[in-house]
Image (tube, helix red, strand yellow):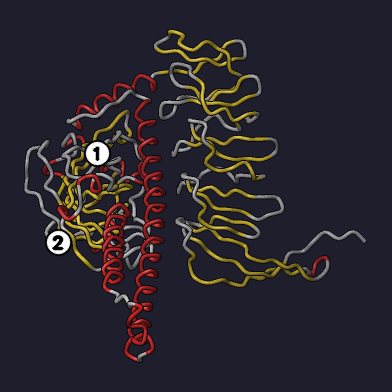
């Protein structure tokens, strides 16, 4: 069933000053693989700017609980004790901000970070980021701000990939918007919708099941006490049909209550395990944001503009670091002053606050202060320049893979060739000598597999599914089947048969 989201209402904005607050929206957020959902009120905010020509985007949100819907029943927040409500987790949100640009209505999607407890009026903890241009502005927003957005984002029945602008289109539109109104808030934002999110409802479910178990036990005790005790003086009554039927009925009822208690007990244990699992997922997200924020020592702020300014100053500091080479070793300097002494046999420029370097046959990542992290062992850089998505081609033994500036392996070292690197659609074909090829995006997501290999034709990737050679020398014919894939990995059309002549050199 997957994640499901149902939009309840979008409140529209009127023309306001640039820093005016965005009005709240009310949405339904479903639990994973479940019909249960929370109806929540979200108060979103967004700010945007540019940093050295690249996008800098921050959004955040407050949330409060409107109602809970569990097993077909609706519950008000006051149904649950505060300690149970405090365990609710709303996470992995993705918000869509519809904006009005000279080119028409478009949308920016943004991650608001991780959210704290419901109803505490605290903004989510977010860190400004620099999304790649081709994943920044979407063009699948065709409706105006007078209509609901949710038809575009209802993942319940038709999951689909976002339709983004090209990198050039997104860059031109974004820079024009930011130059006209900085930061990108207020009158520029026309409507907001929730595209993605998840909620851990197990604390509420656990509470209801415990209540049900308590009621079942109380009912069983009540029934047990109501059973008639037969005295020895009335032993003959045991052999009457009426007494026999009553005893059988009581035994059956007791067994039924016991089974009900057992079922509820198992359900409570399951809910406890599920809640713990979702809590771990939430904590991993919290840790990820905290680690990301530590790069620039950012803290919570009530002002998104201040958060952007602090991020900008931090990133400008590491962006100014210049790689240089002296006596065969690389180091880094800032404004002509050496800040990291030459000591590396291989090195990249800084990217997203980190650089990759190699010393003593070991590849690892460093911060602008020279602090080391994520040692990768005997890995070498095949190229020292990054792709547009911040990846660099590296080699381990005879195998190729891609890593980012933090030293995280994005595409594992298991391929014999990477084709010609990432293309203008930010896709790369990784090939094995005896195992076919895989089409990846810059997030390391596997989009499509080919048993033999891929070939780029226009905007499509053609997979050779099978191939057979028949004949001898000048009479050779090659036949087989091929399948076309779009850049998002979607198959285009069906398998097509091909056939062509291919003379071979024969030695008599």
Figure disc tally: 2
Query: How far across and how far down the image is residue 128, in percent?
Result: 29, 34
Decide if residue 197 is in sight here: no
Quadrant location of the N terminus in the rendered image: bottom left
Q: Is residue 495 above or below residue 130?
A: below
Quarter of the view holding residue 226: bottom left
Q: Is residue 124 above or below residue 150?
A: above
Quadrant location of the C terminus in the rendered image: bottom right
Residue under numbered circle 2: 147
Q: Is residue 48 above or below residue 95?
A: above
Of 245 and 345, the residue lying toward us: 245
Of 431 and 13, the residue lying toward us: 13
Q: Is residue 402 left or right of residue 277?
A: right
Do the CB atoms of the residues marked 2 and 1 lie less than 8 Å apart? Answer: no
Query: How far across and how far down the image is residue 29, in percent?
Result: 26, 56
Residue at 64 percent across and 44 percent down: it is 414
Furthest residue in direction bottom, as rendered: 241
Residue at 11 percent across and 47 percent down: it is 23
User: Regarding mark 1 in the picture, which secondary structure is present there?
Assistant: loop
Furthest residue in direction front, as rendered: 233
Furthest residue in direction right, as rendered: 508
Quarter of the view holding residue 354: top left
Q: Which mark is residue 66?
A: none
Q: Is residue 144 left or right of residue 213?
A: left
Callout 2 environment at 10 Å: few (<14), some (14 to 19), or many (20+)? few
Decide if residue 408 is in sight here: yes
Of 181 and 204, the residue lying toward us: 204
Q: Which mark is residue 124?
A: 1
Q: Which of label 2 and label 1 is nearer to you?
A: 1
Query: How far across and how far down the image is residue 84, in percent?
Result: 25, 48
Q: Is residue 217 above or below residue 307?
A: below
Of 221 and 174, the residue lying toward us: 221
């Amino acid at each position: 069933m997957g994640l499901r989201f149902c939009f309840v209402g979008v409140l529209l904005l009127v023309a306001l000053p640039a820093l005016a607050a965005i009005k709240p929206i009310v949405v339904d957020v479903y639990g994973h693989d479940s019909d249960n959902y929370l109806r929540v009120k979200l108060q979103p905010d967004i700010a945007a700017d540019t940093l050295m020509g690249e996008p800098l985007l921050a959004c955040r949100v407050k949330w409060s609980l409107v109602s809970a819907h569990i097993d077909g029943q609706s519950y008000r927040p006051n149904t649950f004790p505060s300690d149970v409500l405090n365990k609710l987790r709303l996470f992995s949100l993705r918000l869509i901000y519809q904006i009005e640009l000279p080119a028409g209505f478009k949308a920016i999607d943004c991650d608001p970070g991780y959210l704290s407890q419901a109803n505490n009026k605290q903004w989510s903890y977010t860190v400004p980021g620099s999304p790649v241009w081709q994943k920044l502005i979407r063009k699948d927003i065709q409706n105006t701000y007078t209509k609901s957005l949710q038809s575009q984002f209802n993942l319940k029945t038709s999951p689909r990939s976002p339709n983004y602008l090209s990198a050039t289109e997104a860059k031109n539109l974004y820079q024009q918007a930011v130059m006209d109104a900085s930061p990108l808030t207020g009158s520029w934002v026309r409507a907001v919708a929730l595209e993605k999110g998840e909620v851990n409802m197990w604390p509420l479910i656990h509470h209801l099941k415990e209540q049900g178990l308590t009621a079942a036990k109380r009912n069983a005790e009540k029934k047990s006490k109501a059973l008639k005790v037969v005295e020895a003086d009335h032993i003959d009554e045991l052999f009457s049909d009426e007494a026999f039927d009553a005893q059988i009925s009581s035994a059956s009822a007791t067994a039924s209550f016991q089974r009900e208690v057992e079922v509820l007990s198992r359900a409570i244990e399951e809910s406890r395990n599920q809640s713990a699992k979702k809590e771990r997922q939430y904590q991993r997200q919290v840790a990820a944001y905290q680690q990301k924020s530590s790069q620039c020592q950012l803290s919570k702020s009530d002002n998104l503009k201040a958060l952007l300014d602090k991020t900008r100053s931090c990133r400008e500091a590491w962006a100014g670091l210049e790689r240089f080479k002296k006596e065969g070793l690389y180091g880094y300097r800032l404004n002509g002053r050496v800040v990291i002494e030459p000591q590396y046999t291989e090195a990249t420029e800084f990217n997203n606050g980190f650089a990759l370097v190699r010393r003593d046959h070991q590849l690892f990542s460093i911060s602008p202060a020279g602090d080391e992290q994520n040692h990768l062992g005997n890995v070498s850089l095949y190229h020292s320049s990054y792709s547009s998505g911040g990846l660099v081609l590296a080699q381990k033994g005879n195998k190729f893979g891609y890593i980012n500036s933090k030293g995280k392996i994005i595409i594992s070292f298991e391929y014999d060739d990477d084709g010609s690197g990432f293309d203008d659609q930010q896709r790369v074909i990784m090939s094995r000598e005896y195992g076919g090829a895989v089409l990846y995006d810059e997030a390391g997501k596997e989009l499509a597999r080919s048993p033999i290999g891929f070939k780029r034709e226009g905007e499509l990737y053609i997979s050779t599914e099978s191939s057979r050679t028949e004949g001898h020398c000048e009479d050779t014919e090659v036949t087989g089947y091929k399948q076309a894939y779009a850049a998002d990995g979607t198959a285009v059309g069906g398998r097509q048969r091909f056939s062509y002549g291919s003379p071979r050199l024969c030695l008599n």
